[in-house]
Amino acid sequence: MQDKPYIVIMAGGIGSRFWPYSRNNRPKQFLDILGTGRSLLQMTYDRFLETAGPDRFYIVTNQSYRELVMEQLPDLRSEQILTEPLRRNTAACAAYAAYKIHTIDPEATLIVTPADQLILQEARFITTIEKAVEAAKVKGRLITLGIRPNRAETAYGYIQYLENKNGDSAMKVKTFTEKPNQKLAKAFLESGDFVWNSGMFVWKVSSLLDAFSENMPDVAETFEEGKNHFGKSTEQEFINRAYSLVKNVSLDLGIMEKSDNVYVILGDYGWSDLGSWHSLHDLRDKDENNNVVDANALLYETKNCFVKAKNDKLVVVEGLENYLISESENVLLICKLDGEKKFRDFVANAKKKGEDFV
């Protein structure tokens, strides 16, 4: 078991693009979004059990979600749940896990994954992960997983790679592009040397710490002090102080786009980042008019809609196309199905109406 990788699941987000179903006190990673009987966090945990045993998992989440994680993943010990006092994006999240695990196992390999992705073909996914773990053994390499695109999607980031001539499954990364416009996404798709950025990473912990030292020295300096606190009663006090010092920066921006030692493993295993109602609509079963109906509803001349409400209320919809109608607790939301860019405004303005609306 000693050679098994560690699985770091990032589960601290608030899932605002799934509001009002996703709320501050129970965001989307803790919800059964897909109707499987398991939350997205639980599905992510289940997926990686073939790769590593329960003792190799670390969940990084907000302090307010500690109890939720313990409730949903009872196999984990409390010290495997790393709690963040502030939301500081994925660079701080990965740094906390990496510097802590390095004190336990300096030779560790880490798989870092979001908690809210869908993988339809799990056997193919595990094969891809095994390739990535093997590729990460080369000193200094930072491995990311890229998804072969099947459409000109503008909601995902893209990775451009260089073809290998030596048969190595890891391709050198040339560029990262965050959420291009439709014209650029189409050009990326047609070029054949771009893949979607999955937000999943694999590396030796020593390779990542070297990358932090080189590209984010302020983060490295801050978390380096943690070796005197990790696993001790002073750990949380140290983390509270560390998070007040580091900036809100993503791993992609802080490390991956700066490093010249980034490689991508290509995958095709039925992936979705489940980032919005629109992406969920693509995945769910639909009626003859392309509507997803998760409600007791009557629809008339209505197409390409997503209707979600409790069954104790009859929802009647007439004449809508490409709309989301979502009732959850004390909020009824009616908006364009593909209008996820406005959700930050929706949530911010709802908060002004009262904390219990978010």
Image: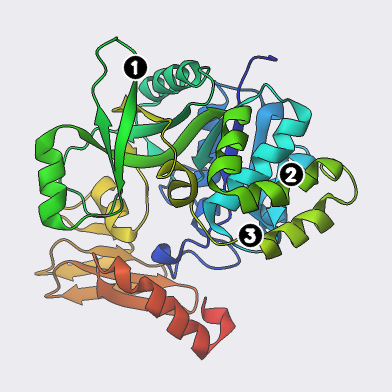
Residue lying at 70% horizontally and 59% vertically, measured from the top left: 63
Q: Which residue lies under the disc numbered 2?
A: 224
- Name the image quarter holding residue 171: top left
Relative to 14, 335 lies left or right: left
Which three-letter amino acid code belongs to the residue tagged 1? Ser
Is 211 situated above or below 336? above
Q: Position of residue 210 (x, y in %)?
A: 60, 34
Mark 3 touching mark 1, by CB under 8 A?
no
Q: Residues within 10 Å of mark 2 (few under 14, many from 20)?
A: some
* CA gap, disc 3 and disc 1: 35 Å
Q: Amino acid at mark 3?
A: Val
Q: Secondary structure at mark 1?
A: loop
Q: Disc 3 or disc 1, which is closer to the eye?
A: 3
Q: Nearer the viewer, residue 350 or 174?
A: 174
Mark 2 or mark 3, earlier in chain? 2
Q: CA distance from mark 2 to mark 3?
A: 13 Å
Between residues 145 and 349, which one lies in front from this camera angle? Answer: 145
Specify whether residue 227 is in view.
yes
Q: Report which residue position mark 1 lands on.
A: 169
Q: Split into 4 quadrants, where in the image is the N terminus? A: top right
Q: Earlier in the sequence, mark 2 or mark 1?
A: 1
- Residue 288 shows in this picture: no
Q: Secondary structure at mark 2?
A: helix
Residue at (62% x, 18% y) in the render: 4
Inter-mark Cα distance, 2 to 1: 33 Å
